[in-house]
Image (tube, rainbow, N blue to C red):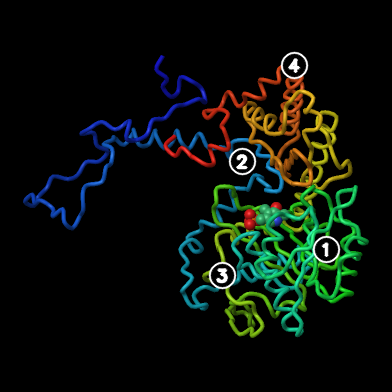
Amino acid sequence: MKTSSGTTGLIQNEPLLWEKGQEGRSGYSMPRRDVPRTKLDERFLGPAPDLPDMSEIDVVRHFTRLSQWNFGVDTGMYPLGSCTMKYNPKINEKMASLPGFAGSHPLLPPRFSQGALQLIYELEKFLAEITGMDAVSVQPAAGAHGELAGMLIVHAYHEKRGKQRSKIIIPDTAHGTNPASAALCGYQPVAVRSNEEGIISPEQVEAVMDEDTAGIMVTNPNTLGLFEKNIKAIADIVHAKGGLVYCDGANMNALMGIVHLGRAGVDVMHLNLHKTFSTPHGGGGPGSGPVCVRKHLEAFLPVPRVVKDGKNYGLTEDLPDSIGKLHPFFGNFGVMIKAYSYIRSLGAGGLKKASQLAVLNANYMKEMLKGTLHLPFDSVCMHECVFSDQNLHDYKVITVDLAKRLMDHGYHPPTIYFPLIVHGAIMIEPCETESKEELDNFIAAVKEIAAEAKTNPENLKNAPTRCKVKRLDETSAARNPCLTG
Ligand SMILES: *Cc1c(COP(=O)(O)O)cnc(C)c1O
């Protein structure tokens, strides 16, 4: 039977435009010519491009179908741990597309950009308050870019004090971008192992901290989804030897309105606006990774900085100790508008509630699944929980099989094989925006798959069976990608 779209449910086969095109068909009509026909000179135009002949509806259907194969938070739960794939209210998109913002040009002088500058200025103030820091620059374009900014600031701070240091302490529960950012600034990462509770203990930091160590980079909550509750004691040890404390705050959605990182001893940190503060991400779109510092590091922030003088907003480059410019103009402005709108529409109480719900949902998930999947660290988690495939090994089933089978149940798989310290990790971040029914449906799907692993493990091995693309040989898929569909 010839398969045609619309008769096979979600399983659609879509030919290439070149396979669909029919010679002579067209999708436009031009007004009748009122000048003599002339042959164009091919020397200037080059040979005609190989484009298929298609009608308008052929093209509309082709691209609409392809768009439906995409999976996103607007189509279903996307519990990708560490990534915070939560639903982002559409009002924030609407604000970002207001003509005054969308049409503003970064080359306009400040006196014609007062609204945009005010938004950046106030957003930086809000983010400072949310984190418990004193000053913020929204210039970095992503989390890793914010880390780089933060580490350049650490570097500039030691340089200014007259003695550069060579090492940086990074726990095994840090995000993989942390050692990379530190290495880019010339620091050699010194690994610290997390303890049996999955967090770092002050004794371990004490053992390695010395006066050649620039500081520590702590991901908090860490990549096991656990709060580093010794952060203050660790900060005291690092400060006593003249080092600085960097906090990777990409997962601030667990802490808003609850933890004051300044009081916990953090000197510099970054946020991910495209995780916590309402910019959809995952497709490589623009992001924003603001860098936030305490007072003693403010002079090193990137330029230009937005300043306020009386009622007027302006820009200054006059910061001799600044690490310089990291991004054209001021960063990704559209992302800032969404974050501003998110913060203003939720208010302080709403932000705190969002964090409480993110933590509640993750703990519900953890408690409901811990009898089904192996839970390596059984303690209260923050916004995500990490399981392993240990219980499934008896049936010769591993994490990737479970992840692929979840796709047959209509879910995007959770993060798998990360963090590296849990063998066969399955890292679930349900996010604050999922309802209890959605969580229960997901939990039921995982339980069904775990039961199936005992009775019909081959169903997991062959999964996904209901998706357009079936089980891929991932090694060849990476080495010899098939780009034609
Ligand atoms: C996502 C994430 C990053 C990196 O952010 P990008 O915007 O992808 O560069 C860094 N640290 C943690 C903890 C993260 O979750």
Q: How many angstroms separate mark 3 from mark 2 (CA)?
A: 29 Å
Pick the front one: 311 or 63: 63
Q: Are marks 3 and 2 in contact (CB under 8 Å)?
A: no
Location of mark 3 (residue): 330
State which tag comes first along the sequence, 1 or 4.
Answer: 1
Horizontally, is 457 left or right of 266 in the view?
Answer: left
The mark found on residue 260 in the picture is 1
**SS category of the residue bearing label 3:** loop
Front position among marks 2 and 4: 4
Q: Residues within 10 Å of mark 1 (few under 14, many from 20)?
A: some
Residue that extends furthest to the top in the rendered view of this protein = 1
Disc number lying in front (1 or 4): 4
Q: Amino acid at mark 4?
A: Thr
- Residue 287: image x %, image y %? 59, 57
Q: Amino acid at mark 2?
A: Val
Q: Residue 422: x, y in percent?
A: 79, 43
> Is label 4 in a helix, a strand or a loop?
helix
* Nearest to N terminus: mark 1 or mark 3: 1
N-terminal of the two: label 2 or label 4? 2
Displayed quadrant of residue 249: bottom right
Q: CA distance from mark 2 to mark 4?
A: 32 Å
Q: Amino acid at mark 1?
A: His
Distance, label 1 to label 2, CA atoms, is 30 Å
Question: How far is disc 4 from disc 3 in space, using C-alphas?
Answer: 57 Å
Q: Is residue 215 left or right of residue 96?
A: right
Residue 73 image label: 2
Mark linked to residue 357 = none
Mark 2: secondary structure: loop
Q: Quadrant of the N terminus?
A: top left
Instruction: Classify mark 1 as within 8 Å of ligand 1 or not, answering yes or no.
Output: no
